[in-house]
Image (cartoon, grey):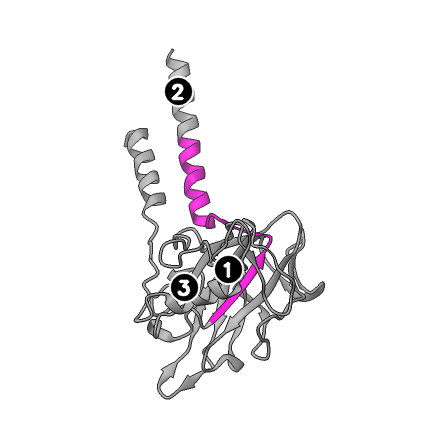
Amino acid sequence: MKKTQLLGLVAAAVLSTPTFAITYGSSGGSTLQGVLDGITQTTPSNPTGMSSIDVTSDFLNDSSDTYWAINGSGGAVNTIIVELAGFKDQTTFGIYDPGTDQHVEIFDGAASAGDLNKTLSILLDGSVLIGGVDTGKDFDANRFNFYLDSSAGNIEGYQGGLFYSDTTLNSDGVDHMAAFQGQGDTVQIDPYAPGIWGANEYILAWEDLYGGGDADYSDFVVMVESISPVPAPATLALMGIGLLGLVGTSRRRKTKA
């Protein structure tokens, strides 16, 4: 097979990662939009006090919000904005490392809106710390999925589940998390003072019912600062193969010349 054909196949494999899109239910996204508008403050540059985020179009593509990493500060602060789920007292939130098959809980069912001081850190040796305390779990690297576990909830036929930012891990095949990057709005999350929602801060909005439920994506809404989305390991490996192929092709051309 010619090298150009191989590179074409590699490129196709990288680009053919399954993509999923957020599709809101009967609310049309209005419930989640109300949550974001509700924390946005009126400022001279934003006299309406409405969020710059349009929840129907400004979410990250699902292929971009699968894996995450903590930024150079070494710690990511997590703050619950709102939790509207019927069985919120049983819902937990945290991070997951597929490489070691380990979950680390950040918030338990007792957590509520405004909870802070939940700093997530991953050390050079892979140790995962919550609030500066070693959890006793080690990840392969500074790369992880987020998860929401509502599997303990079952109210009047509504069933929760264990859902990930990596949609391919969800047994129902539904994208349960919408991620939004800050665009500079001034926001205020009770009981804290107003501040800028910057580009290194993301709001993660979750649907907590198996099969997508009412698809309002407002059951658990959390802001996480000092994180960035990163490519999945498999994508990085494929890109590496492609780059090696390009190097090999270039060297042979130079030799022939």
Q: Secondary structure at mark 2?
A: helix
Mark 2 vs mark 1: in front:
1
Residue at 50% across, 66% down = 38
130 w.r.t. 66: above or below? below
Evaluate whether residue 249 shows in this view.
yes
Left or right, 231 with respect to 27, comes to right
Residue 244 falls within the magenta-colored stretch: yes
- Residue 166, position as x, y percentages in the image: 43, 60
Q: Which mark is residue 177?
A: none
- Residue 3, position as x, y percentages in the image: 32, 29
What's the magenta region? 220-245
Q: Could you tell me how far apart the alpha carbons at marks 3 and 2 are, in whole angstroms?
A: 42 Å
Count neighbours of disc 1 (C-alpha within 10 A) and say few if under 14, some if 14 to 19, many if 20 or more.
Answer: many
Q: Secondary structure at mark 1?
A: strand
Which residue is tagged 3? 169
- Residue 209, position as x, y percentages in the image: 39, 75
**The disc labelled 2 sits on which kind of residue?**
Arg
Which residue is tagged 2? 252
95 w.r.t. 241: above or below? below
Q: Could you tell me how far apart the alpha carbons at marks 2 and 1 are, in whole angstroms?
A: 48 Å
Q: Secondary structure at mark 3?
A: helix
Q: Front-most of 141 and 211?
A: 211
Left or right, 95 with respect to 169, comes to right
Which residue is tagged 1? 203
Count neighbours of disc 3 (C-alpha within 10 A) and say few if under 14, some if 14 to 19, many if 20 or more.
Answer: some
**The disc labelled 3 sits on which kind of residue?**
Leu
